[in-house]
Image (cartoon, rainbow, N blue to C red):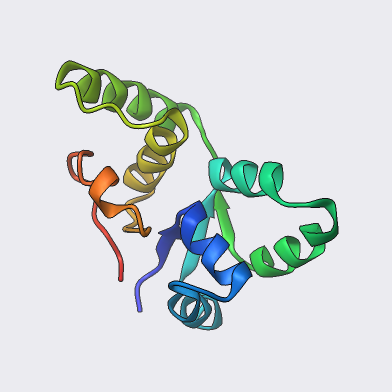
Amino acid sequence: MEVALLDADVLIDYLLGEGVASAVADRLRAKAAATSAVVVYELTRGVAEGERDELRQALRGVRVYPLDDRAARRAAELWRHLESKGQRIGDRDVLTAAIALTAGLPLLTRNSDHFRRVPGLKFAR
């Protein structure tokens, strides 16, 4: 199983035990899961204080790809491209997609219709 970058929505499924939780659990067990600093931000921002330990435990051993200079520049290019086509997506999604692209990883998300606007982005199952 190849490593995939996990989007916030699938990690939320995992934490709640719904949706694609079993697919995420399989990836976590197989050490085939990574995520981005942007997703960690999203999840940490949205999780209740009493659930932070559960989030930390879920992310234990998961490589977190940073928003580095290369990914930030790629995100800006993606944003301009999508804007020019009238197909904007949210800034956090642009950043996550750029991190996946620069890391060379497919994205595991339930929001593939939204992310399909990003040229070159591959998806994991």
Position in image of residue 61 (x %, y %): 65, 68
Q: Is residue 125 left or right of residue 37?
A: left
Q: Is 78 located above or below residue 84 in the figure? A: below
User: Residue 1 versus residue 17: which sits nearer the camera?
Assistant: 17
Q: Is 52 located above or below residue 57 in the figure? A: above
> For the N terminus, which image quadrant?
bottom left
How many dots with numbers? Answer: 0
User: Residue 80 versus residue 90: which sits nearer the camera?
Assistant: 90
Position in image of residue 93 (x %, y %): 41, 38
User: Residue 75 versus residue 86: which sits nearer the camera?
Assistant: 86
Q: Is residue 113 left or right of residue 69?
A: left
Residue shown at 59% from the left, 64% from the top: 62
User: Residue 12 versus residue 56: which sits nearer the camera?
Assistant: 12
Q: Is 86 located above or below residue 93 in the figure? A: above
Q: Is residue 24 left or right of residue 47?
A: left
Position in image of residue 36 (x %, y %): 52, 48
| Residue situated furthest right in the rendering | 50
Position in image of residue 101 (x %, y %): 32, 44
Residue shown at 18% from the left, 39% from the top: 119
| Residue situated furthest left in the rendering | 85
Residue shown at 63% from the left, 49% from the top: 43
Q: Is 33 located above or below residue 35 in the figure? A: below
> For the C terminus, which image quadrant?
bottom left
Residue shown at 54% from the left, 76% from the top: 28
